Image: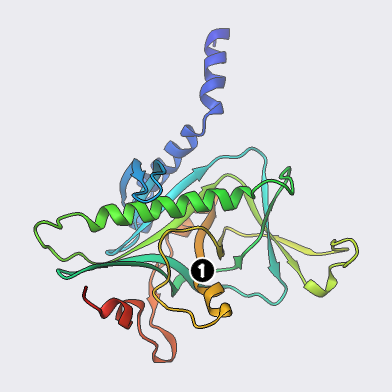
Amino acid sequence: MNPKDEELLGIVNASGFLFQLRVEQEVRDTYSSHRKEVLAHEHRWVDPLTHLEGFIDLIISAGTNAKMVIECKRVRDAEWVFLVPDEARATRSVRVLWTGRSKERNCAAWDRFMLRPESLEAEFCIVRGQGDTQQPMLERLASNLLASSEALAEEELGYHREEGIPGGLQFYYPVLVTTATLRICRFHAGDIDLPSGELNEAGFEEVPFIRFTKSLSSTLSSSRFPSRLEEAAQEGHRTAFVVNAGQLVQFLKGRWEFDPPRDGSPWPWDLPRWREVP
């Protein structure tokens, strides 16, 4: 390869587009093993309220009524460490976006469901080189992913509106696919030294994917009206799946099914808030 071509190749390889294209090809090539279909790539989105805009890297099907909204993030020789309490176990709990449409009205909200496949869950992610004064990188990426998911949901609610065709229920799963190695740090809060704010020891293990759940910025709310601060804090949580690229196919093979609400609780769309017709 001549020097000029090497220089140009370096420019190409410095871009994250190659990784995005490879993720899309991987999904297409392995369709027979997971049955998730590529629906769109580089899909432009615009937030109707904030007017923020961008492009969704990849949108793929996740069952009849669900889509994964995927952001691809290539990083070099990186490890992302998630803080997970010692007592935490894998969970099916997830807080994702759903929409419903009928001839009378549209509705959309972020709510808690019990969704397979299960995984560990974390609120804090530590990335090497990230300063205390910076907004955490994963929070930035996840917030943008949530905004694009909401914009996509808004767009789809508008399809066929004039014809009055009911659209039923739709679900949107924000997914961040990365080249970073994902590790969890098992710890007990009581072992953190109070004067220094440090741990003397902790356990670490690699995970294929994890639920990143915390109070992330979004335009849409929960379908439940909180009656106290603790409930408001929980209803403000949102989930984005973080997946190591090497484990993507295994992640896609998950059953992606909802378990019925526990204790006879209603589904979010059966709550009075959504039964009201304007």
Please name the residue shown 21% across and 76% down the image.
277
Task: Between residue 269 and residue 56, name the one nearer to us.
Answer: 269
Task: Between residue 47 and residue 76, name the one nearer to us.
Answer: 47
Q: Is residue 59 left or right of residue 159?
A: right
Type of the residue with mark 1: Gly
From where the camera sits, is residue 2 visible?
no
Going by the picture, which residue comes out furthest to the right?
195
Mark 1 secondary-structure assignment = loop
Quarter holding the N terminus is top right
Task: Between residue 91 and residue 100, name the one nearer to us.
Answer: 100
Going by the picture, which residue comes out furthest to the bottom?
263
Against 208, is 227 above or below? below
Against 74, is 251 above or below? below
Number of marks present in the image shown: 1
- Which residue is identified by label 1? 236
Question: Which percent across, then down, holds residue 155?
Answer: 27, 52
